[in-house]
Image: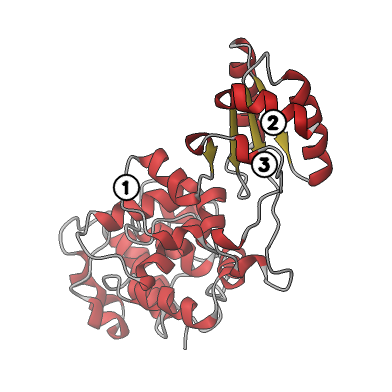
């Protein structure tokens, strides 16, 4: 077979495109679409994931090599060092399937190995993605949660700051949490992150170590008051302030924080604070909160705050991100 491949390959090697895709950037739906498009052009697409399938494909390829153009996609995932953990692997640590009788016949510009960075650059039109996106956990997050990952990165780029390791951690955490942490869109998403997102914070802990989680915590704490305090030692007080401001905002569009000292002296330090008005109330926010005719009106602010304050969390404790309150 090698002899036939040598002859056919030397004459028609430009008809063979070989793609090494260990990160499986080509997903099943895309493979199906590509297969259909190539088939309409009279070309053949072969996708392999292991040596046995590759050998089968190459046998078929030898029989067809003189008559049709081929695209072979190698989606195997093999580490050069068997003791290396997948999460520690760089692109250079991934070994493609060997094909010594075929690969030498593939033209240099027809042997492709797209990276996650290439994928992001192609998807967004932005060329300055850092090389770190090719390694864990960013390569996985960029593939599994591309929309939030890209949106958070683009928000950061607009700040004009230089991308640091800490900023990349926050971008990765944004992908896991499903919220652009560089542009949290108001008090309700902040409350949800602090008190109603424990499963998502547990996912953050799977991808990032305690030191990296602290980077995320510190970033959130730097949000303007009272939102930043939702992620620190004053979480319960900040929760009461946020909810009170949302209610007061219905009656005092300008400087609602000036009314906080009348509700409780404990809230006086937040008198200069303001929040964006709530638009869509999530399921966990009590229905009475969004009903301006309920007890949670301006008068209700005083009575309920004095009797123990609002519980706008449905009795949920703050999200249990390890070290979040440390």
Q: Who comes first in sequence, dot 1 or dot 2? A: 2
CA separation in Å, label 1 and label 2: 38 Å
Label of residue 285 in the image? none
> Viewer-proximal residue, 287 or 217?
217
Q: Residue furthest left?
A: 254
Q: Are marks 3 and 2 in contact (CB under 8 Å)?
A: no
Residue 325 in the image: above or below residue 35: below
- For the point 65% across and 27% down, the residue is 9
Residue where numbered disc 1 is placed:
127
- For the point 72% across and 29% down, the residue is 5
Task: Indicate the position of residue 106 as horizontal and vertical percent values.
Answer: 58, 35
> Which of the 4 quarters of the picture holds residue 60?
top right
CA separation in Å, label 3 and label 2: 20 Å
Residue 82 in the image: above or below residue 292: below
Q: Who comes first in sequence, dot 3 or dot 1? A: 3
Residue where numbered disc 3 is placed:
74
Task: Indicate the position of residue 38 as horizontal and vertical percent values.
Answer: 60, 18
Question: How crowded is the residue under tag 2: few (<14 C-alpha within 10 Å), some, or many (20+)?
Answer: some
Residue where numbered disc 2 is placed:
6
- For the point 71% across and 57% down, the residue is 78
Task: Indicate the position of residue 100 as horizontal and vertical percent values.
Answer: 70, 45
> Viewer-proximal residue, 40 or 283?
40
Q: Is residue 100 visible?
A: yes
CA separation in Å, label 3 and label 1: 25 Å
Regarding mark 1 in the picture, which secondary structure is present there? Answer: loop
Question: How crowded is the residue under tag 3: few (<14 C-alpha within 10 Å), some, or many (20+)?
Answer: many
Task: Indicate the position of residue 157 as horizontal and vertical percent values.
Answer: 26, 55
Q: Is residue 282 visible?
A: no
Question: How crowded is the residue under tag 1: few (<14 C-alpha within 10 Å), some, or many (20+)?
Answer: few
């Amino acid at each position: 077979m090698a002899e036939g491949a040598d002859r056919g390959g030397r004459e028609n090697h430009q008809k063979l495109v070989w793609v090494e895709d260990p990160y499986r950037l080509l997903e099943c739906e895309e493979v199906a679409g590509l297969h259909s498009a190539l088939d309409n052009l009279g070309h053949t697409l072969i996708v392999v994931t292991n040596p046995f399938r590759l050998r089968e494909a190459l046998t078929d390829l030898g029989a067809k090599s003189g008559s049709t153009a081929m695209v072979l996609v190698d989606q195997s995932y093999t580490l050069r060092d068997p003791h290396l953990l997948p999460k520690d692997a760089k692109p250079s640590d991934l070994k493609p399937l060997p094909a010594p009788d075929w690969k030498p016949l593939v033209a240099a510009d027809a042997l492709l190995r797209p990276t996650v960075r290439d994928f992001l650059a192609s998807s967004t039109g932005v060329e300055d993605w850092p090389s770190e996106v090719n390694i864990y956990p960013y390569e996985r997050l960029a593939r599994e949660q591309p929309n939030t990952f890209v949106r958070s990165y683009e928000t950061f780029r607009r700040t004009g700051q230089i991308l640091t390791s800490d900023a990349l951690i926050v971008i990765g955490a944004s992908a896991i949490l499903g919220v652009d942490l560089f542009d949290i869109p108001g008090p309700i998403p902040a409350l949800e992150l602090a008190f109603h997102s424990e499963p998502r914070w547990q996912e953050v802990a799977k991808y990032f170590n305690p030191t990296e989680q602290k980077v995320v915590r510190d970033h959130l704490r730097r949000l303007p008051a009272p939102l930043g305090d939702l992620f620190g030692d004053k979480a319960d007080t900040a929760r009461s302030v946020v909810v009170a401001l949302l209610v007061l905002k219905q009656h005092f569009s300008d400087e609602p924080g000036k009314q906080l000292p009348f509700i409780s002296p404990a809230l006086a330090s937040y008198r200069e604070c303001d929040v964006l008005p709530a638009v869509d109330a999530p399921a966990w926010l009590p229905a009475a909160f969004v009903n301006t005719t309920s007890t949670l009106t301006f008068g209700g602010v005083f009575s309920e705050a004095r009797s123990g304050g609002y519980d706008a969390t449905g009795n949920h404790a703050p999200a249990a991100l390890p070290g979040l309150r440390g």
